[in-house]
Image (spheres, rainbow, N blue to C red):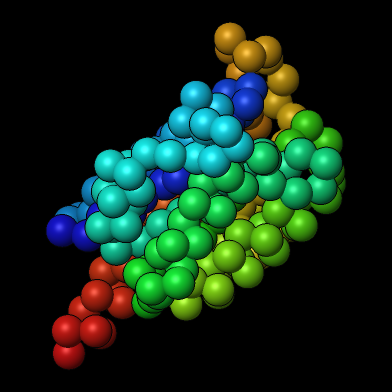
Amino acid sequence: MTTVAIVYFSGTGHNKLMAEAVAVGVEMVDNATAKIFRITGEQITAGRWKDDAMLNEISSADAIVFGSPTYMGGIAAQLKSFVDTASSIWFAQGWKNKLAGGFTHSNSPSGDKQSTLIYLAVLAAQHSMIWIGAGEMANPETGINRLGSYLGVMGNGGGGDKDNPVVEPGDLAFAKLYGQRIAKATHAWAADKMA
């Protein structure tokens, strides 16, 4: 059984829906399980994220998918606080050769979301992880990858409010396909490492 950790922050609930869609995709693959880890402001004390039990559980996964809304052209401060805490893992290269991926959401079609995905890919590279791209061509008919993102999954708009967020169905379908891709890649990577 391979495990995919989905680590994300969501301020308005849109990114939470994206994380859940990635998890559904992972679970559609035989012998793969998804574990969702929501980063919250309550885990941050004196400017530092702290949850050793969660960090240990994330570190035990075979792959880690990072998710953040795009705020002002980059990742949310709450996820950045988690990333900074994980620098102790970086120093020991504790995530080396794990698979990695990422997703983001913002209200506008662009919103400079690519900056967020680039940040997450660089984070993975610094941890010596293997980044998995989106793997889906843009399809205007289904709405899958309607924003033309190939580094990771992007979503935008959708509406609703904090109590009832709505994400475009094509964006959720894209996230689900990405979860499947990550799970299948994790299986293939694990089998290759065993050979």
Residue 153 in sight in this render = yes
Furthest residue toward bottom:
195
Which of 152 and 60 lies nearest the eye of the viewer? 60
Identify the residue shown where x is 50% and y is 61%. 87
How many numbered circles are shown? 0
Which of 112 and 91 lies nearest the eye of the viewer? 91
Does 48 sit left or right of 145 as displayed?
left
Residue 162 figure quarter: top right
Furthest residue toward front:
46
Which of 49 and 141 lies nearest the eye of the viewer? 49
Quick one: quadrant of the N terminus?
Answer: bottom left
Tell me: residue 101, above or below residue 130. above
Residue 133 figure quarter: bottom right
Quick one: quadrant of the C terminus?
Answer: bottom left
Image coordinates for residue 153, horizontal then vertical, percent? 61, 52
Image coordinates for residue 137, horizontal then vertical, percent? 64, 62
Does 173 sit left or right of 191 as displayed?
right
Identify the residue shown where x is 68% and y is 46%. 75
Furthest residue toward top:
163
Residue 138 in sight in this render = no
Image coordinates for residue 105, horizontal then vertical, percent? 67, 39
Identify the residue shown where x is 70% and y is 26%. 158
Tell me: residue 24, above or below residue 33. above
Image coordinates for residue 52, horizontal then vertical, percent? 33, 44
Identify the residue shown where x is 28% and y is 51%. 56
Residue 115 figure quarter: bottom right
Does 78 sit left or right of 129 as displayed?
right
